[in-house]
């Protein structure tokens, strides 16, 4: 039987959430997570980036989206705590981020060291089926149970909590509100939902019983992690994104040393020779990123028309410097190298927010939609094509919520609300009055 007592280190980290921090400070917290029986104790924990003053009486807890990390909220979190008095923002890392070997992305590491370590495949690579079979159980139950422990820490001292997330993180937040925690609905822990280009009730996919059985069987006998870049290992997208961002952040105008890198898929390589910043911008901009990369696109800019190497010209919502800043930050980054396939399956099954044969098979407990009374904010980009607002409107209609605020921003791409320049960020502009309304 596993020892269910919290380690002294984890307990101290949780208590650190209650210690004073100066206004504007950013603190990394480590919070004890759900005690998943098959998982080694060292992974039953989550990390949180906390922004804002210790005197805050309200906490906005944010959950990252598909293959996202807590660091992706850094720009928008810093802007929110400046604009909303008495607010802290807590950005959550899922437990899977602890599997990443980010040792050569840490401050003080040279570009040559990082390129040799990651380009030479010298880093610790996790083979999910061999090294982390327990991650086959990291579905929605584990995610919301981990999240609940963060919410409980945030609530200490009488603070009020608003729960939100981006993309699949917004879906997780909606599922949390309806979740049955041994008879207690999750929505009793929070008083508002902030759904950033995500949600349930038809926002994304769904999974009936037959599909749930098929996908669960494939996960149970195979790889527990998603491969975001088809044909490459699960870690490839995270490693390449952070390596490219590191070069763009350190030497933005230098000729790209990664453009001819063997591990970089051909679809990410521009025709002309480009700078480090231009290679990064080309990979993420909506006009040039390859098919299948829509979840990580921005409205950014374009390659310069002349020059050798070609540079990057900002012109949209998200400057390339923001992409570099967010993707290259440690010890808490903006990407998730090892995203659990079971979590995506469970979120799809939870779409209806009711008891179904698929949810019974998977142990998904989203039963309390009808009693949700939290105020709801929803923001959608052009990527989700109206589904976010439709799903949020249905959530409002079928719940007891008395206030629903929504914004459709069709010119924005999926990552613009998090990575965009604050002065051009329509999500930031519209969510501030919602948070002020909550008090």
Image (tube, rainbow, N blue to C red):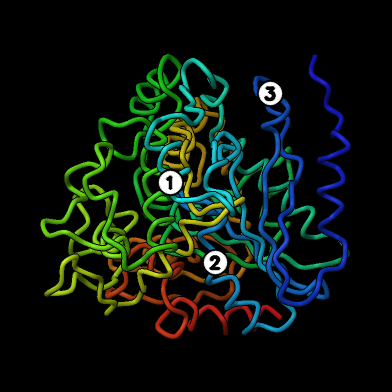
- Asked if residue 141 is positioned above or below residue 300 in the image, the reply reads above
The residue that label 2 is drawn on is 194
Q: Find residue 407 and name its label.
A: none
Q: Which residue is mark 1?
A: 112
Which percent across, then down, holds residue 9? 84, 39
Q: Nearer the viewer, residue 438 or 228?
A: 228
* Circles 3 and 2 in contact, beta carbons < 8 Å: no
Numbered disc 2: secondary structure: strand
**Viewer-proximal residue among 229 and 264:** 264
- Check the picture and name the quadrant holding the N terminus: top right
**In terms of secondary structure, where does tag 3 sit?**
loop
Q: Earlier in the sequence, mark 3 or mark 2?
A: 3
User: Is 209 on the left or on the right of 256, as rendered?
Assistant: right
Q: Residue at x 50, y 54 (%)?
A: 334
The residue lying toward the viewer, choosing from 315 and 361, is 315
Q: Position of residue 53 (x, y in %)?
A: 77, 74
* Residue in the image at 82% along x and 49% along y: 14
Q: Nearer the viewer, mark 2 or mark 1?
A: 1
Whether residue 68 sits left or right of residue 202 in the image: it is right
Dot in front, 3 or 1: 1
Q: CA distance from mark 3 to mark 2?
A: 32 Å
Q: Position of residue 117 (x, y in %)?
A: 45, 36
The answer to whether residue 431 is visible is: yes
Q: Nearer the viewer, mark 3 or mark 2?
A: 3
């Amino acid at each position: 039987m596993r020892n269910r007592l919290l380690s002294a280190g984890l307990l101290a980290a949780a208590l650190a959430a209650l210690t004073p921090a100066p206004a504007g400070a950013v603190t990394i917290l480590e919070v004890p997570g759900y005690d998943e029986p098959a998982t080694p104790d060292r992974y039953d924990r989550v990390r949180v980036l906390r922004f804002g003053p210790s005197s805050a009486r309200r906490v906005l807890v944010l959950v990252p989206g598909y293959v996202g990390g807590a660091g992706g909220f850094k720009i928008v979190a810093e802007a929110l705590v400046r604009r909303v008095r008495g607010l802290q923002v807590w950005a959550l890392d899922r437990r899977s981020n602890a599997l990443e070997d980010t040792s050569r992305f840490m401050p003080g590491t040279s570009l040559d060291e990082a390129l040799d370590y990651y380009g030479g495949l010298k880093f610790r690579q996790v083979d999910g089926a061999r090294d982390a079979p327990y991650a086959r159980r990291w579905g929605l139950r584990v995610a919301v149970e981990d999240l609940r422990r963060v919410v409980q820490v945030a609530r200490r001292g009488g603070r009020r909590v608003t729960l939100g997330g981006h993309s699949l993180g917004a879906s997780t937040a909606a599922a949390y509100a309806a979740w049955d925690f041994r008879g207690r609905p999750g929505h009793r822990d929070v008083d508002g939902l902030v759904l950033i280009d995500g949600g349930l009730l038809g926002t994304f996919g769904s999974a009936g019983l037959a599909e749930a059985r098929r996908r669960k069987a494939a996960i149970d006998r195979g790889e527990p992690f998603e491969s975001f870049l088809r044909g490459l290992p699960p870690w490839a997208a995270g490693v390449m994104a952070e390596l490219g961002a590191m070069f763009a952040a350190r030497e933005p105008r230098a000729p790209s040393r990664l453009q001819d890198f063997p591990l970089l898929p051909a679809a990410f390589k521009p025709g002309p020779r480009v700078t480090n910043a231009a290679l990064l911008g080309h990979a993420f901009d909506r006009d040039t990123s390859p098919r299948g990369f829509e979840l990580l696109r921005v409205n950014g800019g374009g390659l310069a028309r002349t020059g050798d190497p070609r540079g990057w010209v900002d012109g949209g919502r998200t400057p390339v410097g923001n992409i570099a800043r967010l993707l290259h930050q440690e010890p808490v980054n903006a990407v998730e190298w090892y995203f659990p396939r079971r979590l995506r399956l469970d979120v799809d099954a939870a779409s209806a927010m009711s008891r179904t044969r698929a949810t019974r098979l998977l142990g998904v407990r989203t039963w309390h939609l009808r009693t949700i009374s939290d105020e709801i904010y929803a923001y959608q980009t052009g990527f989700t094509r109206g589904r976010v607002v439709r799903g949020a409107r249905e959530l409002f209609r079928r719940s007891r919520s008395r206030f629903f605020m929504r914004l459709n921003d069709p010119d924005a791409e999926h990552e613009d609300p998090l990575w965009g320049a604050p002065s051009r960020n329509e999500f930031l502009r519209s969510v501030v009055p919602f948070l002020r309304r909550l008090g």
